[in-house]
Image: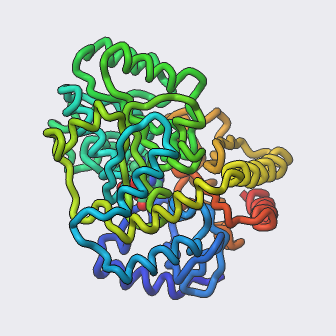
Amino acid sequence: MHYQRSSTLFKEAKQFIPGGVNSPVRAFQSVGGTPIFVEKASGAYLYDVDGNILIDYIASWGPMILGHAYPPVIEAIKRRAEKGTSFGMPTELETTIASLALQMIPNMDKIRFVNSGTEACMSAVRLARGATKREKIIKFKGCYHGHSDAFLIQAGSGAVTFGSPSSPGVTQGTAKDTLLAGYNNLEEVTSLFEEYPDEIAAIIVEPVAGNMGCVLPKNGFLEGLRSLCDRYGSLLIFDEVMTGFRLAKGGAQELLNIRADIATYGKVIGGGLPVGAFAAKEEIMKHLAPEGPVYQAGTLSGNPLAMAAGLAMLQALNEDAALYSRLDQKTQRLEEGFHSVLKSLDLPYQINRMGSMISLHFTEKEVVDFETSALGNNNRFNSYFHGMLKEGIYLPPSAFESYFLNDALSFSDIDKTIEAFAEVVKKL
Ligand code: KE4
C-alpha cells in the first residue's frame, strides 16, 4: 500500500486548514504518519485517494452504522435536495423524525434538533442549569461531550491525545463550574454532592464511555448517579451521542434500563449529515425557548436535507428488529478472534466491549476509567494501528477511541480482519 496522493493532499490542506483537518483526531498526531484522504466509501469499505481499499472500523466515528452510502439514505437526500436545502422555516419532516425518534427513545416527551453532538450537549447543560437554577455540573475524566468550553476540562478523545487536559481558551470562570470525578467512582461523585449540596444542576455522563477507548459502567455506577441526582434535585444527562440508536433502538437508556432526565444524540441520528439532538420530559423541555426562557437556536437546526437523511436512517433501524443482535454477533466474533490470537502471545491486553462498541488496550490492568486507560502502551498501539492499516484495516487513529462496527461488515470481513490481526500483533 502507498499513500502518495494522501500525503500530497495533506501538505496542500495544511496551507489552508489548521493542521490540514477540520477535526483534530483525523490528523493522526496520536498515531503518527499521514492521514488517509478518502475518495469515497460504500458499505463496509473505504476507497482512499491512492486506490487502497480499507475495511472500515470507525464508521465516521459512529454515524455509518448501516454501512457507507446506505441506499435508502442516499435516495432520501437526493429526493429532498430537489425541493431545496434550507428554508429557516418549519417543515413537516421535522415533526415526522421527532415523533419517530421519540417512539424509539424511552422515557422522553420532546426533542430539539441541532447540528452536532457538541451543540446537543452544550444546550442540554444550559437547559439543566436553567431548569434547576443551579450553576455547577459534574463530568467524568476521560468522557468527551464535544468542544464546548464547559466540557474541555480534562476531556477525553482528541484533547487527551494532545496532552492538554484543559484546553487553552477555557476561562477559569467556566472551569470553576465544572466538577470532575473519576468514571465508575461513585465515592467521588458523592463527595462532590456533599460539598455542593444545592449547587449542582446536572451530572453529564457517557452511559457507556467511548472516548477513553470503550469503558463500561460498573454494576451500580449509573444507578448510583440516578439516585444521587434524585436525592439532591439535580438532573442526570446521558450523553448518548455515541450510544444512541447504536447500543439499542432506545440506546443505553433501553439497554441498561436506566432513566435519564435529558439525553443527547448525534452521529447515527443524522444518517451521516450534521444532526445533533437533545430530548427530555415535558417538565424540563418547557423551559426551552420559545416556550420558556432558556435560549437555544440555530440557522440550520432541523435542516430538511439532514432530517431526510436522519429519518431514512431511523426508519431503517426501527424496522430491522434483528440489526442489533447481528451487530452484536459480528463484534463478538471480532472480540473472540482477538482473544484467540492474543492468548497465545505474551502480550498484556484488555478488550472492552458493549454491543458494537469495542476497544483493545495494551495493558495489564482492567480499563475502568481514564487513569487505567492512560496506562496503555501507546507506542505498541501505534505500531498496531499502522500494521493493521498496511493490512487494509482502518481502525480509530488513537488509543483513546472506540471502534464502531457497521452492519455492512460481513463475517468474512471480520475473519479477514482477524487474520490481519494475527499477522500484526505477533510482530509487536
Ligand atoms: P460532535 O460535536 O463531534 O458531533 O459530537 C461531540 C461528541 C459528544 N459526545 C460524545 C460521547 C462524543 O463521542 C462526541 C464526538 N466523538 C468524537 C469521537 N470520539 C468525534 C470525532 C471527532 O472529534 O472528530
Of 26 and 221, the residue lying toward us: 221
Measured from the top left, where is residue 15 in percent x and y? 30, 81
Position of residue 248 in the picture relative to residue 135 (left or right):
right
Q: How is the image coloured?
A: rainbow
Residue 37, horizontal then vertical, whole percent: 50, 78
* 305 left or right of 16 in image: right
What residue is shown at x 58% (from left), y 75% (from top)?
71
Q: Tell me if residue 370 can be seen.
A: no
Quadrant of the image occupied by residue 87: bottom left
- Seen in the picture, residue 326 relative to 283 is either above or below; the reply is below
Residue visible at 42% across and 41% down in the picture: 239
Q: Is residue 300 visible?
A: yes
Quadrant including the N terminus: bottom right
Q: Nearer the viewer, residue 48 or 96?
A: 96
Q: Residue at x 71, y 72 (%)?
A: 391
- The C terminus - image quarter: bottom right
Q: Position of residue 127 (x, y in %)?
A: 25, 38
Identify which residue is drawn at 44% across, 40% down: 142
Residue 143 x, y percent position in the rendering: 43, 41
* Quarter of the image where one finds residue 158: bottom left
Q: Nearer the viewer, residue 145 or 101?
A: 101
Answer left or right for 44 relative to 280: right
